[in-house]
Amino acid sequence: MVKVFPFIFILLWSSAFITTKPIIDNSEPFSALAFRFALVALGFFLFSIYSKKKIFTDRKNFLESFLSGVLFHGIYLGGVFFSISKGMPTGIAALIVTLQPILTNALSGPLLNEKVSIKQWIGVLLGFSGAAIVLGLDIGSEIPTIGLVSTIIALIAITTSTIWQKKLSNNLPLSVSNMNQALGGFVFHIIIIILFAEPYIDLSTTFLIAMSHQVFLVSFGAFTILMFLIKKNSASKTVSIFFLIPPTSAFMAWLFLNESLSKLDFLGFLIATIGVYIATRD
Protein backbone atom coordinates (compact mmCIF):
# COMPACT_ATOMS: atom_id res chain seq x y z
CA MET A 1 0.00 0.00 0.00
CA VAL A 2 2.82 2.40 0.91
CA LYS A 3 4.27 2.09 -2.61
CA VAL A 4 1.15 3.65 -4.15
CA PHE A 5 1.21 6.65 -1.78
CA PRO A 6 3.41 8.77 -4.10
CA PHE A 7 1.00 8.21 -7.00
CA ILE A 8 -2.01 9.09 -4.85
CA PHE A 9 -0.19 12.19 -3.61
CA ILE A 10 0.63 13.32 -7.15
CA LEU A 11 -3.00 12.96 -8.28
CA LEU A 12 -4.45 14.74 -5.24
CA TRP A 13 -1.88 17.54 -5.10
CA SER A 14 -2.06 18.16 -8.85
CA SER A 15 -5.83 18.51 -8.69
CA ALA A 16 -5.41 21.49 -6.34
CA PHE A 17 -4.29 23.69 -9.23
CA ILE A 18 -7.68 23.21 -10.90
CA THR A 19 -9.58 24.53 -7.87
CA THR A 20 -7.21 27.36 -6.85
CA LYS A 21 -8.45 29.85 -9.45
CA PRO A 22 -12.19 29.46 -8.57
CA ILE A 23 -11.31 30.07 -4.91
CA ILE A 24 -9.30 33.21 -5.69
CA ASP A 25 -12.07 34.49 -8.01
CA ASN A 26 -14.55 34.29 -5.11
CA SER A 27 -12.47 35.48 -2.17
CA GLU A 28 -9.49 37.42 -0.91
CA PRO A 29 -6.66 34.82 -0.93
CA PHE A 30 -5.60 35.06 2.73
CA SER A 31 -9.23 34.98 3.89
CA ALA A 32 -9.79 31.80 1.88
CA LEU A 33 -6.68 30.18 3.34
CA ALA A 34 -7.61 31.18 6.91
CA PHE A 35 -11.06 29.66 6.33
CA ARG A 36 -9.49 26.51 4.88
CA PHE A 37 -7.02 25.88 7.68
CA ALA A 38 -9.54 26.63 10.42
CA LEU A 39 -11.57 23.73 8.99
CA VAL A 40 -8.48 21.54 8.58
CA ALA A 41 -7.31 22.17 12.17
CA LEU A 42 -10.79 21.39 13.47
CA GLY A 43 -10.94 18.21 11.36
CA PHE A 44 -7.61 16.87 12.62
CA PHE A 45 -8.59 17.85 16.19
CA LEU A 46 -11.80 15.81 15.98
CA PHE A 47 -9.96 12.89 14.36
CA SER A 48 -7.30 12.95 17.10
CA ILE A 49 -10.02 12.89 19.75
CA TYR A 50 -11.80 10.04 17.95
CA SER A 51 -8.59 8.00 17.62
CA LYS A 52 -7.67 8.76 21.26
CA LYS A 53 -4.40 10.51 20.46
CA LYS A 54 -2.73 12.71 23.03
CA ILE A 55 -3.39 16.24 21.78
CA PHE A 56 -1.56 18.34 24.37
CA THR A 57 2.18 17.86 24.26
CA ASP A 58 5.34 19.61 25.37
CA ARG A 59 6.18 23.08 24.07
CA LYS A 60 9.08 21.91 21.88
CA ASN A 61 7.02 19.43 19.84
CA PHE A 62 4.14 21.89 19.49
CA LEU A 63 6.33 24.76 18.31
CA GLU A 64 8.18 22.53 15.83
CA SER A 65 5.00 21.43 14.06
CA PHE A 66 3.35 24.87 14.45
CA LEU A 67 6.29 26.64 12.75
CA SER A 68 6.34 23.99 10.02
CA GLY A 69 2.72 24.89 9.35
CA VAL A 70 3.58 28.61 9.22
CA LEU A 71 6.17 27.85 6.54
CA PHE A 72 4.10 25.40 4.48
CA HIS A 73 0.44 26.37 4.93
CA GLY A 74 1.20 30.01 5.64
CA ILE A 75 4.08 31.44 3.64
CA TYR A 76 4.19 28.86 0.81
CA LEU A 77 0.48 28.60 0.03
CA GLY A 78 -0.09 32.26 0.86
CA GLY A 79 2.65 33.25 -1.57
CA VAL A 80 1.23 31.09 -4.37
CA PHE A 81 -2.38 32.23 -3.85
CA PHE A 82 -1.34 35.88 -3.56
CA SER A 83 0.84 35.79 -6.69
CA ILE A 84 -1.96 34.29 -8.79
CA SER A 85 -4.43 36.86 -7.41
CA LYS A 86 -2.04 39.60 -8.61
CA GLY A 87 -1.98 38.25 -12.16
CA MET A 88 0.96 35.86 -12.03
CA PRO A 89 0.42 33.22 -14.75
CA THR A 90 -0.36 29.93 -13.01
CA GLY A 91 2.03 27.97 -15.24
CA ILE A 92 5.00 30.22 -14.51
CA ALA A 93 4.22 30.24 -10.78
CA ALA A 94 4.07 26.44 -10.83
CA LEU A 95 7.37 26.24 -12.72
CA ILE A 96 9.16 28.50 -10.22
CA VAL A 97 7.85 26.46 -7.28
CA THR A 98 8.93 23.29 -9.13
CA LEU A 99 12.52 24.37 -8.48
CA GLN A 100 11.97 23.08 -4.93
CA PRO A 101 13.53 19.62 -5.45
CA ILE A 102 16.68 21.24 -6.86
CA LEU A 103 17.07 23.48 -3.81
CA THR A 104 16.22 20.62 -1.47
CA ASN A 105 18.83 18.39 -3.09
CA ALA A 106 21.43 21.15 -2.80
CA LEU A 107 20.67 21.75 0.89
CA SER A 108 19.83 18.26 2.17
CA GLY A 109 23.49 17.23 2.06
CA PRO A 110 24.94 19.92 4.34
CA LEU A 111 21.80 20.32 6.50
CA LEU A 112 20.50 16.75 6.79
CA ASN A 113 23.67 14.78 6.08
CA GLU A 114 21.87 13.02 3.23
CA LYS A 115 23.97 11.74 0.37
CA VAL A 116 22.61 13.01 -2.95
CA SER A 117 23.98 10.80 -5.71
CA ILE A 118 24.82 11.73 -9.30
CA LYS A 119 21.90 9.53 -10.34
CA GLN A 120 19.52 11.63 -8.24
CA TRP A 121 20.87 14.85 -9.74
CA ILE A 122 20.37 13.46 -13.24
CA GLY A 123 16.81 12.50 -12.33
CA VAL A 124 16.16 15.94 -10.84
CA LEU A 125 17.43 17.75 -13.95
CA LEU A 126 15.36 15.50 -16.22
CA GLY A 127 12.33 16.03 -14.02
CA PHE A 128 12.64 19.81 -14.15
CA SER A 129 13.28 19.76 -17.90
CA GLY A 130 10.13 17.69 -18.45
CA ALA A 131 8.03 19.98 -16.26
CA ALA A 132 9.40 23.04 -18.09
CA ILE A 133 8.52 21.53 -21.48
CA VAL A 134 4.93 20.87 -20.40
CA LEU A 135 4.38 24.28 -18.80
CA GLY A 136 6.44 26.29 -21.24
CA LEU A 137 7.31 29.92 -20.64
CA ASP A 138 5.28 32.61 -22.35
CA ILE A 139 8.11 35.09 -22.74
CA GLY A 140 5.74 37.69 -24.11
CA SER A 141 3.48 37.66 -21.06
CA GLU A 142 3.80 40.41 -18.50
CA ILE A 143 4.91 39.05 -15.16
CA PRO A 144 3.93 41.26 -12.21
CA THR A 145 6.93 42.02 -10.02
CA ILE A 146 5.01 41.50 -6.77
CA GLY A 147 3.74 38.16 -8.10
CA LEU A 148 7.26 37.05 -9.01
CA VAL A 149 8.62 38.06 -5.59
CA SER A 150 5.84 36.27 -3.68
CA THR A 151 6.34 33.11 -5.77
CA ILE A 152 10.07 33.10 -5.00
CA ILE A 153 9.26 33.55 -1.29
CA ALA A 154 6.85 30.61 -1.60
CA LEU A 155 9.63 28.52 -3.18
CA ILE A 156 12.01 29.30 -0.31
CA ALA A 157 9.27 28.55 2.24
CA ILE A 158 8.33 25.11 0.87
CA THR A 159 12.01 24.14 0.58
CA THR A 160 12.71 25.27 4.15
CA SER A 161 9.55 23.54 5.40
CA THR A 162 10.53 20.23 3.79
CA ILE A 163 14.00 20.27 5.34
CA TRP A 164 12.62 21.50 8.68
CA GLN A 165 10.02 18.69 8.70
CA LYS A 166 12.74 16.10 8.18
CA LYS A 167 14.75 17.52 11.10
CA LEU A 168 11.83 17.44 13.52
CA SER A 169 11.89 15.04 16.44
CA ASN A 170 8.76 13.35 14.99
CA ASN A 171 7.43 12.45 18.43
CA LEU A 172 3.84 13.45 17.67
CA PRO A 173 1.11 11.30 16.10
CA LEU A 174 0.60 12.35 12.47
CA SER A 175 -2.94 13.67 13.05
CA VAL A 176 -1.81 15.83 16.01
CA SER A 177 1.19 17.14 14.07
CA ASN A 178 -1.08 17.99 11.12
CA MET A 179 -3.51 19.75 13.47
CA ASN A 180 -0.71 21.92 14.86
CA GLN A 181 0.56 22.69 11.37
CA ALA A 182 -2.92 23.68 10.21
CA LEU A 183 -3.21 25.88 13.28
CA GLY A 184 0.10 27.52 12.34
CA GLY A 185 -1.21 28.25 8.85
CA PHE A 186 -4.48 29.63 10.24
CA VAL A 187 -2.74 31.97 12.70
CA PHE A 188 -0.36 33.22 9.99
CA HIS A 189 -3.19 34.11 7.61
CA ILE A 190 -5.21 35.78 10.38
CA ILE A 191 -2.21 38.00 11.19
CA ILE A 192 -1.81 38.90 7.50
CA ILE A 193 -5.51 39.78 7.29
CA ILE A 194 -5.35 41.98 10.42
CA LEU A 195 -2.25 43.83 9.22
CA PHE A 196 -2.61 44.04 5.44
CA ALA A 197 -5.78 42.60 3.89
CA GLU A 198 -9.49 43.28 3.70
CA PRO A 199 -11.23 39.94 4.37
CA TYR A 200 -13.73 38.84 1.74
CA ILE A 201 -15.34 35.50 0.91
CA ASP A 202 -18.29 34.90 -1.40
CA LEU A 203 -19.78 31.63 -0.15
CA SER A 204 -21.01 30.74 -3.62
CA THR A 205 -21.56 27.18 -4.78
CA THR A 206 -18.38 27.39 -6.85
CA PHE A 207 -16.32 28.53 -3.85
CA LEU A 208 -17.74 25.87 -1.54
CA ILE A 209 -17.13 23.05 -4.01
CA ALA A 210 -13.56 24.21 -4.72
CA MET A 211 -12.83 24.75 -1.02
CA SER A 212 -14.27 21.34 -0.08
CA HIS A 213 -11.94 19.78 -2.61
CA GLN A 214 -8.89 21.53 -1.15
CA VAL A 215 -9.85 20.77 2.44
CA PHE A 216 -10.71 17.10 2.10
CA LEU A 217 -8.62 15.83 -0.82
CA VAL A 218 -5.60 18.12 -0.58
CA SER A 219 -5.18 19.09 3.10
CA PHE A 220 -6.57 15.91 4.69
CA GLY A 221 -5.41 13.55 1.95
CA ALA A 222 -2.37 14.75 0.00
CA PHE A 223 -0.66 16.68 2.81
CA THR A 224 -0.95 13.75 5.24
CA ILE A 225 0.63 11.46 2.64
CA LEU A 226 3.43 14.00 2.06
CA MET A 227 4.25 14.20 5.77
CA PHE A 228 4.29 10.40 5.94
CA LEU A 229 6.64 10.16 2.93
CA ILE A 230 9.03 12.80 4.33
CA LYS A 231 9.14 10.94 7.64
CA LYS A 232 9.82 7.54 6.02
CA ASN A 233 12.15 8.56 3.16
CA SER A 234 14.96 11.00 2.49
CA ALA A 235 13.87 14.57 1.84
CA SER A 236 15.72 14.69 -1.49
CA LYS A 237 13.98 11.59 -2.84
CA THR A 238 10.54 12.56 -1.55
CA VAL A 239 10.43 16.00 -3.16
CA SER A 240 11.52 14.66 -6.55
CA ILE A 241 7.93 13.50 -7.14
CA PHE A 242 6.93 17.19 -7.25
CA PHE A 243 8.25 17.30 -10.81
CA LEU A 244 5.27 15.19 -11.88
CA ILE A 245 2.76 17.67 -10.47
CA PRO A 246 2.86 20.34 -13.22
CA PRO A 247 2.54 17.76 -16.04
CA THR A 248 -0.23 15.95 -14.15
CA SER A 249 -2.04 19.24 -13.56
CA ALA A 250 -1.79 20.03 -17.26
CA PHE A 251 -3.18 16.58 -18.09
CA MET A 252 -6.09 17.09 -15.68
CA ALA A 253 -6.80 20.50 -17.20
CA TRP A 254 -6.90 18.82 -20.63
CA LEU A 255 -9.13 16.05 -19.32
CA PHE A 256 -11.60 18.12 -17.27
CA LEU A 257 -11.30 21.71 -18.54
CA ASN A 258 -10.76 21.02 -22.26
CA GLU A 259 -7.37 22.76 -22.26
CA SER A 260 -5.12 21.71 -25.13
CA LEU A 261 -2.13 19.39 -24.89
CA SER A 262 0.44 19.08 -27.66
CA LYS A 263 2.74 16.23 -28.58
CA LEU A 264 5.53 18.27 -26.99
CA ASP A 265 3.56 18.32 -23.74
CA PHE A 266 3.30 14.54 -23.74
CA LEU A 267 7.05 14.34 -24.43
CA GLY A 268 7.68 16.58 -21.43
CA PHE A 269 5.43 14.37 -19.30
CA LEU A 270 7.47 11.33 -20.36
CA ILE A 271 10.80 13.05 -19.62
CA ALA A 272 9.58 14.19 -16.18
CA THR A 273 8.35 10.67 -15.38
CA ILE A 274 11.73 9.16 -16.34
CA GLY A 275 13.50 11.79 -14.24
CA VAL A 276 11.39 11.06 -11.16
CA TYR A 277 11.89 7.32 -11.64
CA ILE A 278 15.68 7.75 -11.78
CA ALA A 279 15.77 10.16 -8.81
CA THR A 280 13.66 7.98 -6.51
CA ARG A 281 15.10 4.56 -7.31
CA ASP A 282 17.16 2.85 -4.64
Image (tube, rainbow, N blue to C red):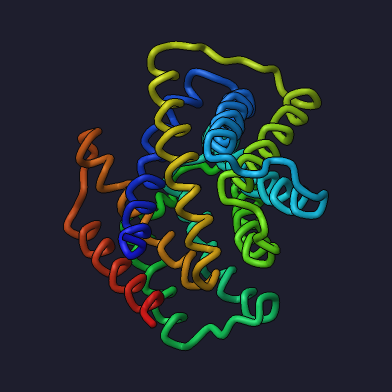
Percent coordinates x, y for residue 263 in the rendering: 17, 58
Left or right, 103 with respect to 67, comes to left
At horizontal 25% and vertical 33% (from top left) the residue drawn is 257
Given residues 267 and 205, the one toward you in this image is 205
At horizontal 36% and vertical 79% (from top left) the residue drawn is 281
Percent coordinates x, y for residue 167 in the rendering: 68, 67
Q: Is residue 82 above or below residue 273?
A: above
Given residues 262 and 257, the one toward you in this image is 257
At horizontal 73% and vertical 27% (from top left) the residue drawn is 190
Percent coordinates x, y for residue 150 in the rendering: 64, 45
Q: Is residue 45 above or below residue 122?
A: above
Given residues 259 and 45, the one toward you in this image is 45
Given residues 122 and 46, the one toward you in this image is 46
How many numbered marks appear? Answer: 0
The quadrant in which the C terminus is found is: bottom left
Percent coordinates x, y for residue 252 in the rendering: 26, 43
Left or right, 232 with respect to 55, comes to left
Residue 207 in view (yes/no): yes
State which quadrant residue 130 falls in. bottom left
Q: Residue furthest bottom?
A: 118
The quadrant in which the N terminus is found is: bottom left
At horizontal 62% and vertical 40% (from top left) the residue drawn is 179
Left or right, 262 with respect to 204, comes to left
Residue 96 in view (yes/no): no
Q: Residue furthest front?
A: 52
